[in-house]
Image: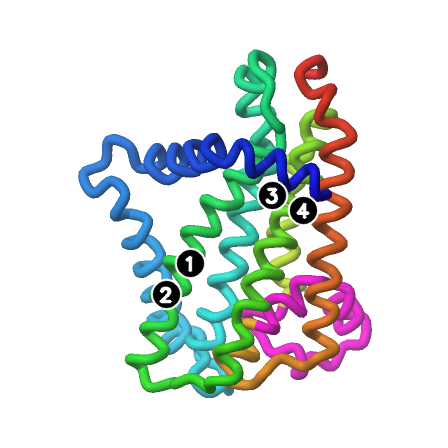
């Protein structure tokens, strides 16, 4: 693992160039260009506020806040996994021509989405402050643990799926379907404790995102320090996913060029 990290560090300029290419290239040719990275998250959050305070009101105080603090990390996870799962195939010419750590490609995708997440989270925190929801100091201090888990879990799963997609091209299409199901198996639109179906509760309990997203909800909505048990599960699940994703990716990446 240390050797893997050291090699990625040696290629940090390539990672950054790919991240910059993704951030800038996405809106290349548009009038506002890079500013869309700020405008789109803001508009998305404003839509959440409008829809979930007017149309889909629930018996949850400040329901729009609950939605925002769950959807912002979910969006990062969703976008990172979607963009990374087919990233090796999409960069097949680069992979086939020159040597570099193949991890650079999915890593740059995840970092790009993570930067967008930080922008969205900054906007969300500003809205929570201006809207009067407020913060708890100790809870807010726990937020970096949730951010760490989100990034690590997203990266681990992205590496696993990117490697699998090289050998089975259906993976990136399956990911779309799984993510559409997974959002409903993560307590974002509803409160986990309100579910009284034992089977559904079990499905929520085995979903690592329940604990990762739950930490954001604890810190920002409930204004409470996440429970130790839930935090341990979130950290452990994230680290294990990174180890599995890295091991699988490193095992099969030397053969990517031949398979492609």
Tag in front: 3 or 2: 2
Disc on the earlier residue, 1 or 3: 1
Quadrant of the frame with the N terminus? top right
Q: CA distance from mark 2 to mark 4?
A: 25 Å
- Assess whether residue 200 is covered by the magenta stretch: yes
Circle 3 crowding by C-alpha within 10 Å: few under 14, some 14–19, many from 20: some
Quadrant of the frame with the C terminus? top right
Q: Which residues are magenta?
A: 187-215
Label ID, residue 176: 3
Disc on the earlier residue, 4 or 3: 4
What's the magenta bit mostly, secondary-structure-wise? helix
In the drawing, does residue 233 fall left or right of residue 42? Answer: right
| Residue highlighted by disc 4 | 157
In the drawing, does residue 123 fall left or right of residue 171? Answer: left
Image location of residue 106, percent across then percent down: 57, 37
Q: Residue at x 38, y 72 (%)?
A: 125
Instruction: Label 2, secondary structure: give it.
Output: helix
Q: CA distance from mark 2 to mark 1?
A: 6 Å
């Amino acid at each position: 693992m240390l050797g893997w990290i050291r090699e990625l560090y040696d290629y940090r300029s390539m990672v950054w160039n790919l991240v910059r290419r993704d951030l800038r290239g996405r809106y290349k040719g548009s009038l506002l260009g890079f500013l869309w990275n700020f405008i789109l998250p803001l508009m998305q959050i404003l839509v959440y506020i409008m829809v979930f305070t007017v149309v889909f009101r629930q018996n949850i105080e400040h329901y729009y806040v609950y939605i925002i603090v769950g959807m912002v990390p979910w969006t990062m996870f969703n976008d990172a996994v979607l963009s990374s799962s087919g990233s090796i195939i999409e960069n097949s010419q680069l992979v086939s021509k020159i040597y570099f750590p193949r991890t650079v490609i999915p890593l740059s995708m995840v970092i790009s989405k993570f930067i967008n997440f930080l922008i969205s989270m900054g906007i969300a925190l500003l809205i929570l402050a201006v809207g009067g929801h407020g913060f708890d100091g100790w809870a807010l201090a726990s937020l970096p643990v949730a951010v760490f888990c989100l990034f690590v879990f997203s990266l681990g799963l992205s590496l696993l799926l990117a490697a699998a997609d090289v050998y089975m091209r259906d993976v990136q299409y399956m990911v779309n379907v799984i993510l559409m199901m997974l959002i409903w198996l993560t307590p974002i639109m509803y409160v986990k404790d309100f579910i009284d179906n034992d089977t559904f509760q079990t499905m929520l309990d085995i979903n690592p995102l329940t604990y990762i997203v739950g930490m954001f909800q604890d810190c920002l909505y409930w204004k409470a320090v996440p429970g130790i048990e839930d935090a341990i599960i979130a950290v452990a699940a994230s680290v294990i996913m990174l180890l599995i994703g890295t091991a699988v990716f490193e095992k099969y990446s030397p053969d990517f060029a031949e398979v492609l």
